[in-house]
Amino acid sequence: MGNRGPTLEDVAREAGVSRATVSRVVNGVRNVAPGIQEAVREAIARTGYAPNQAARSLVTRRTGAVALVLSATGGSFTARLFSDPFFGRVVDGVLPVLRERAVQPVLLVSESEPARLQLVDYLRRGGADGALVVPLDEDDPLPGMLVAAGLPTVLFGRPRPGVRCGWVDLDNAAGARLAAEHLWAAGRRRPAVVAAPESAPAARERLDGFTAALAARGAVAVPVERGRYTEESGRDAMARLWARDPGIDAVFAANDLMARGACRFLAERGVAVPEAVAVVGFDDSTAARDAAPPLTTVRQPVEEMASAMARLLLARLDAGTPRTGSRLFEPVLVVRESA
Amino acid sequence: MGNRGPTLEDVAREAGVSRATVSRVVNGVRNVAPGIQEAVREAIARTGYAPNQAARSLVTRRTGAVALVLSATGGSFTARLFSDPFFGRVVDGVLPVLRERAVQPVLLVSESEPARLQLVDYLRRGGADGALVVPLDEDDPLPGMLVAAGLPTVLFGRPRPGVRCGWVDLDNAAGARLAAEHLWAAGRRRPAVVAAPESAPAARERLDGFTAALAARGAVAVPVERGRYTEESGRDAMARLWARDPGIDAVFAANDLMARGACRFLAERGVAVPEAVAVVGFDDSTAARDAAPPLTTVRQPVEEMASAMARLLLARLDAGTPRTGSRLFEPVLVVRESA
DNA sequence: ATGAAAGCGCTAACAT
DNA sequence: ATGTTAGCGCTTTCAT
């Protein structure tokens, strides 16, 4: 049930001043005599007053909250959501920026069509002042819907054409190129790829970037199998690759978890990593560092990117203009033991 | 920026009716002539109207949102939050129940002292109608703060004494007993425990329940090492146990992830599981099924418990009474290959 | 520096 | 079945 608590009026009466004065004190506006300020604060403490956000929002048109939306179009993805360190890193990057500005971060998950509709509704009604969206699939209509609803929005990953909003992204193709060049330079001539679902644009850039870099060096067709981001699916994809061609001498995986899965399969078969097969992951998540052997991987500065996303949104909210900036990040190859 | 959109007034003018009628249509109240309903719907579509939640909440004292709070007192726990399948299961259990009732689920994380304060403030101001709280540490003051603030609250795990609110919980001690009896019946006489941090009440019940059940059967002191819920920490704890006593013939871990870590250590040492050492996990998360070998584990019906938590809260919100029910769940031993 | 008063957009009596 | 009207609790001019 709602705040059946004390109102500004109650505090005002208690302190012997007007509502306006209490409001000024609560909102830290200057021009209130120190003595009165003190009296008001005491009255607030005595009454246990807490402002009613609905009433406040009604006039300020602000909620003081920002949504962090994790969205997928496919079925239940909470399993991935809460097992891939990637999302934790996004959250880690976003929280401090919002907290510093006393903006309440609100996590929303959109895992199905009805959920998406409900979520858009919630946000259109003013559930939050803006949205930071992490879409997992390219064909996700959510960003477009939010932008169309006029909600200030910033994406992790570039928006599809026609959707005008801010974004941060990694130069995924450049990252894949880094991996390809590293493997090539190490003399690997028969590389394969454990790719992610086609629906993810970032994943496609990684795959295309890798094969393109290799093709430029004269490599022939690179075998590709797809996983679903999990370690398990990476293991299975590697098994399929191996069944197709046990002559493979290098593997590039679209994320660290799948790279670990590939390593696991190879270990099961007694294939030495990196001696017989070199493995390169992507992200440089904690999963890469903790792997056995530690993974060589393409570092994606997720926390930084997430912080930038939050700052971009806050800047837009401050400015009040409908324009938002964007930022592209450069990947770095982190060489460990697996390649 | 706030909804600078059309208001009820605009729609009413457009449809040639009064605000009240539009409100009735929007809220699905009967007693509106079909023809008028139609006209209003068209006007809504034409204007692109979306209700202003702040205005609505101001009068209804409802936000239509419920918070799912993940709370820890220790430092950054988002790493665990987004790597332990446990939370995903909680979310999976809660979402459908809320969605069905058109209540917007809002995830809030409370990972530090300032975050906690900000969160309590947000909720006190009416950020959500109630809270489902998953506290990770026994000494977490958050549940008490929310209850004191008068917010309808239901916990995952029993509240500390003095905090009156609803809860759901697993009979952890019974689960540990199940594990102990299984191992004992299999002839294991030198079991050890990979426990969780002492601060978690559920974890303590598991440890105490296990040692108590064993003591009742005449077992001597059981060696204990603690992990931090992650696979990595479970591996390390197992390594310490092994260093202390390589005669161990069984291990009970406080969650599946740590059980996996224990298995990994044993595999590295060439110790056969379950032949030489039997391993029992806790939770029956996906991590148990996917482990090599598949884990024998104590099943905690997390999704069901989470659904129950949500229903308990909704029932209380419907009733408007300050009382909330609670529910204790019984664990089941799932026997697979590791023990 | 403080108070009075006018809304913000909506729902819910109450009237008709 | 529909319209009129009185607030919900707050911020914010505008006076003083």
Image: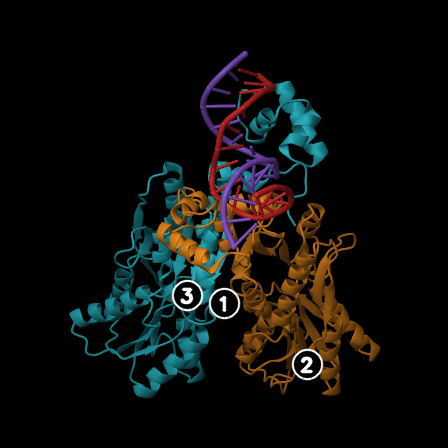
Chain colours: A orange, B cyan, C purple, D red
Q: Which residue is mark 2?
A: A333
The amino acid type of the residue labelled 3 equals: Ala
**Among numbered discs 3 and 1, the one appearing first in the sequence:** 3
Q: Nearer the viewer, residue A7 or B182?
A: A7
Mark nearest the camera among 2 and 3 is: 3
Q: Which residue is mark 1?
A: B78
Name the disc covering residue A144, or none.
none
- Asked which secondary structure carries label 1, the reply is helix
The amino acid type of the residue labelled 1 equals: Thr
- Asked which secondary structure carries label 3, the reply is loop
Q: Chain of mark 2?
A: A
User: Do the CB atoms of the residues marked 1 and 2 lie less than 8 Å apart?
Assistant: no
Q: Chain of mark 3?
A: B
Name the disc covering residue B72, or none.
3
Task: Judge from the rendering whether residue A149 lies leftward or rightward of residue B92; answer left or right.
Answer: right
Q: Is residue A248 visible?
A: no
Q: Chain of mark 1?
A: B
Around disc 1, counting alpha carbons within 10 Å, would you say few (fewer than 14), some (14 to 19), or many (20 or more)? many
Task: Judge from the rendering whether residue A287 lies leftward or rightward of residue A176; answer left or right.
Answer: left
Around disc 2, counting alpha carbons within 10 Å, would you say few (fewer than 14), some (14 to 19), or many (20 or more)? many
The amino acid type of the residue labelled 2 equals: Leu
